[in-house]
Amino acid sequence: MTIRPNIPAWIELVRAGIRWHYMYRFNVFVGLAMTGITIYLLTVVWQAAYAGQTEIDGVSIDQMLVYLTIANLQLYVLRPEVSGDIQVRIREGQIGFDLSRPVGYPSQLVATAAGDMIGVLPMVLVALPVAFVVGELQPPASAGAGIAYAGSFLLAWIVAVQLNMLIGLVSFWTLEMTGFEMMYRLVGNFATGALIPLWFMPDVLRFAVQLLPFQAIAYVPVSIYVGEPATGAIWSALALQLFWAGALIVIIQWFWRRAFRHTVIQGG
Amino acid sequence: MIAVICLVPIIQVDNLVKEFHRPKRFDGPLGGLRTLFTRQYISTRAVDGVSFSIDEGELVGYLGANGAGKSTTIKMLSGILVPTDGRVEVNGLIPWERREQNALQIGVVFGQRTQLWWDLPLADSLRLISKLYRMEPARYRRNLAQMTELLGLEPFLSKPVRQLSLGQRMRGDLAAAMLYEPRILYLDEPTVGLDVVAKERTRQFIEKINRETGTTIMLTTHDLADVERLCKRIIFIDRGTVLYDGPVDRLKRRYAPYRMLDVTLASGEDDDLDTDRIQLDVPGAEIVERGDARLVIRFDPEVLPVTDLISAVIATHPVSDISIVEPDLEGVVREIVEAGEVRS
């Protein structure tokens, strides 16, 4: 017997996620400041790299700056805290309560992360003028690109949450994982393509990054936005994201079953 | 009256084992490095072959010293830990295999922690729980009103959980565990850290829930007053195995078959009452303490009914007060834990 989906519970968890987001108001503003600084620095660096040329390898300086601005704005929204939440719950022994709910743990996490993401969306209204000042903003390359971007953004969110959850589930084995987490952030941030688009990576590096799911978080959607879809065409770029979203869901199902059997609940 | 006959116990535990593994630690130079790379593990058996069964509507005390394996058992029964070996069925379900269905039929309170959301007001936490447990809005409102009244939640329903006192938080936790009317309630130290008034309130609630709704309750506690007040049956475990499973009375009788009769003598016309000279010629009774106008008599109620003893005492001596002292469970438990076994 499979249990029927508990939609009211998910809605309630999403709402709780939104509220939790604003409990930590200070974090919201720190994140915004960091995003502004990143966009500003990248703009300066890439302007210097273009050294007055208007186009390199078919990518104009304007496209480049819009790409960087949108990519980093997007990362501001797609910064799931799932992994950190799992670690805290495990360390404090609270995980027992999460596991004793009649709603699967991964779906609780996804619902809360959705609330967290929805909670940050209104902040984009504040972030846009900041991005406009420090970077460069333009509308999507075409109406079609705009619509495709919306879908692509959603897929990017799914991939970002799943990846973050996968890392968090590792803490069912190793309780201490600050170092692992730092490595993940370093590799992950770079491989999303939010600092250097994949176009400009050396062949070997680009090949490696293309095998990883991280590109689906920033590079794929934002390249659609600026009219240079990652795989050459919009549909295949979306298909690539869809593949990763699906593959990660399957991996997490498998991984989660193993993690659960490994549960150790801290304290008496 | 409808007689409910339970053919199958609601909780059935057979040979339950839980082993925990951790990497072996090495001392000495480079010990840390060896620990890091070792493939050797030390395993400890927190639960080592526990079996028991509990019928619907029972209120059972699950006792044992710290680290005896009580909480580990409860966690396996609630489906959040997978045992190393053994079988558990809770109302026909294997908890860790049917975790989500099992969750709907059990309520859990861990006194050391809270299942409520720290940053949300208590009312919001309860609302979220009602959604998680698929409650109809009408049923939720009815049960919330009932819990609010029973546990006196009204004054702090709108306060964030982190601002509640321990007693208030515990009441919130009890409400959260019973809100969706589970058939089984696991209470793991529900009175820990509470003051006398809060303890009494918690006990009253547990008693009422068990009596009026027939909820099956498994209670873990270190406060034996909880057990004496609430449980007829106890399961006593030590180092992961069951030492005793049966009525509280029987255990007490086995350990402390004697009761004490505390007699205060009336001085009457005799100015000096010399208790040293008093002899009691009743078989099965013995004076164990003599004080100023006071005698403590030890007797075995199996051999000598208390009424016979009292009549015998009153017949020979002027008495102003008399009281019977029951043996307490605390002394019994202390003796069991120290000996590591139960006398047969």
Image (cartoon, coloured by chain):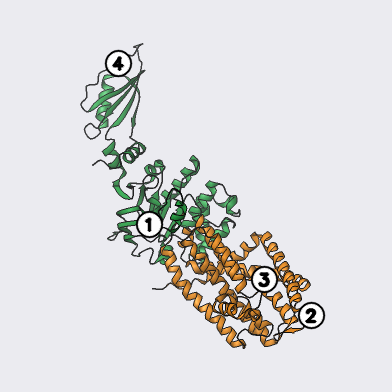
Numbered disc total:
4
Which chain contains the residue that carries disc 4?
B
Residue A19 in percent (x, y) is at 62, 63
Asked if badge 3 and badge 1 are on a common chain, one would say no
Q: Residue at x 40, y 41 (%)?
A: B225
Residue farthest to the front? B29
Disc 4 on helix, strand or loop? helix
Q: Is residue B230 left or right of residue B123?
A: left
Q: Residues within 10 Å of mark 2 (few under 14, many from 20)?
A: few
Q: Residue at x 59, y 87 (%)?
A: A235
Q: Residue at x 24, y 27 (%)?
A: B285
Query: Which dot marks residue B276?
Result: 4
State the separation of the CA atoms marked 2 and 3. Answer: 35 Å
Q: To which residue does mark 2 refer?
A: A52
Viewer can see residue A207: yes
In terms of sequence position, does the residue under pointer 4 or pointer 1 come before the other? 1
